[in-house]
Amino acid sequence: MQKIIVPESLNEERIDVALVELTNPYSRSYVQKLVSKGLVLINKEVAKKGNRVATGDEVIIPTPYWVTYSELVKIAR
């Protein structure tokens, strides 16, 4: 998991816009998918589409990782 504290420059931005600014490699569509699946937390509460962040909010998002081939086979079954 990745913990992010919202800076003053992103106060009152929508959660997807703020996260794209704060997590450089993530696209907006990827962030929107994370939010829609309930995988993003703002101050320990599940973020909803259209939520706005405030300065100092704690945002937690999952960190992507690669799984091994054998784990992919298990998932595919």
Image (cartoon, rainbow, N blue to C red):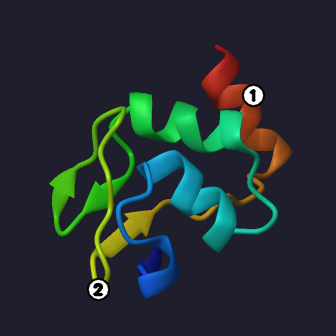
Whether residue 27 sits left or right of residue 1 in the image: it is right
- Across and down, in percent, residue 58 comes to 30, 77
x%, y% of residue 17? 57, 51
Q: Residues within 10 Å of mark 2 (few under 14, many from 20)?
A: some
Q: Residue shown at 38%/52% (left/top)? A: 40
Q: Amino acid at mark 2?
A: Gly
Give the residue drawn at x 56%, y 60%. 19
Which-is-in-front pick, marks 2 and 1?
2
Q: Position of residue 47 (x, y in %)?
A: 28, 46
Instruction: Report the amino acid beneath label 1.
Output: Val
| 37 versus 60 height, above or below | above
Say which mark, if any, is on residue 56.
2
Image quadrant in which the C terminus is located: top right
Q: Which residue is mark 1?
A: 73
Element carrying mark 1 = helix
Q: Is residue 48 above or below residue 54?
A: above
User: From what the image shows, is residue 29 above or below residue 61?
Assistant: above
